[in-house]
Image (cartoon, rainbow, N blue to C red):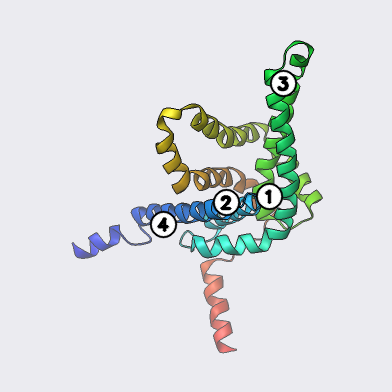
Amino acid sequence: MKERLWGIFSEESFLGRITSRIFILFGANLMFVIFSIPVVTLVPAWVAMYHVCLKTLRQDSQLNPFVEFWKGFRANFKQAFLSGLAILGILAVLIADILFVAKADGFITNFRWPVYLLTGFVLLILFHLFPVMAAFADSLKGLLRNSIFFAAKNPLRAVLILAINVLPLVWTYKDVTRMPLYAFIWASIGFAGIAMIESHLLLRDFSKYLPEIPSAEELDGKHEEDIRK
């Protein structure tokens, strides 16, 4: 009975895996919120969060999310920071355009849908760029090309990714009465939960271009060889 009870709470059990995954989401989300406070580090923090999610799905569901987040943040900081400045500038212009055409009258109203579609396209590429940047090492031009490639490879998935990133934020903004509840969800696992779902959607295509993960037997054999040396 005692062994069976301990088996339920072991790391290999279903409950243990769920608990471990929740801990990873909470840790990655907490680090993302903290590292995003300066705003200019938002993109490096976002990429680091995808680094944690992708590594969790590919390699180790028992990893330390705080350590892995820091590794991803340091590894991608320079490229993500510089591209983040450009991204924030582009988003600022698009938001200003949306606010302008939404309130304008007359001939300007003809530009509403083009502005909305352009904004949606830019966001769609950005929400592919962050996980691509976390998964692959390349120049910014190459990463953008790969983001467009993965988005065009499965348009329905691309639209779904856009929806799961945008609609929860819009819903939170609209439903003011439940704002404390939404704030708690976003601060605990909201951002990382979305990143994990998106990582799961993209991982099948990503895996075709990523190096294979050594099996447990191969790792044990390598470890024994290192010991002999």
Q: Nearer the viewer, mark 2 or mark 1?
A: 2
Q: What is the secondary structure assignment of the residue under circle 1?
A: helix
Q: Of marks 2 and 1, which one's residue comes earlier in the chain?
A: 2
Q: CA distance from mark 4 to mark 1?
A: 25 Å
User: Crowding near pointer 1: few (<14 within 10 Å), some, many (20+)?
Assistant: many
Q: CA distance from mark 3 to mark 2?
A: 30 Å
Q: Of marks 2 and 4, which one's residue comes earlier in the chain?
A: 4
The picture quadrant where one finds residue 159 is top right
Q: Are marks 3 and 2 in contact (CB under 8 Å)?
A: no
Q: Of marks 4 and 3, which one's residue comes earlier in the chain?
A: 4
Residue most toward the left? 1
Identify the residue position indicated by label 2 in the image. 37
Residue 148 at x, y percent in the picture? 75, 40
Q: Of marks 3 and 1, which one's residue comes earlier in the chain?
A: 3
Q: Of marks 4 and 1, which one's residue comes earlier in the chain?
A: 4
Q: Residue at x 65, y 35 (%)?
A: 158
Residue 194 at x, y percent in the picture? 53, 42
Asked whether 156 or 223 is in front, the reply is 156
Q: CA distance from mark 2 to mark 4?
A: 26 Å
Residue most toward the right? 141
Q: Are marks 3 and 1 in contact (CB under 8 Å)?
A: no
Residue most toward the top? 106
Q: What is the secondary structure assignment of the residue under circle 2?
A: loop
Q: Residue at x 30, y 59 (%)?
A: 9
> Which mark identifies residue 132?
1
Residue 229 at x, y percent in the picture? 60, 89
User: Crowding near pointer 2: few (<14 within 10 Å), some, many (20+)?
Assistant: few
Looking at the picture, which amino acid does disc 1 mark? Val
| Residue 153 can be seen in this image | no
Above or below, comparing residue 40 to residue 217 in the picture: above
Identify the residue position indicated by label 3 in the image. 101
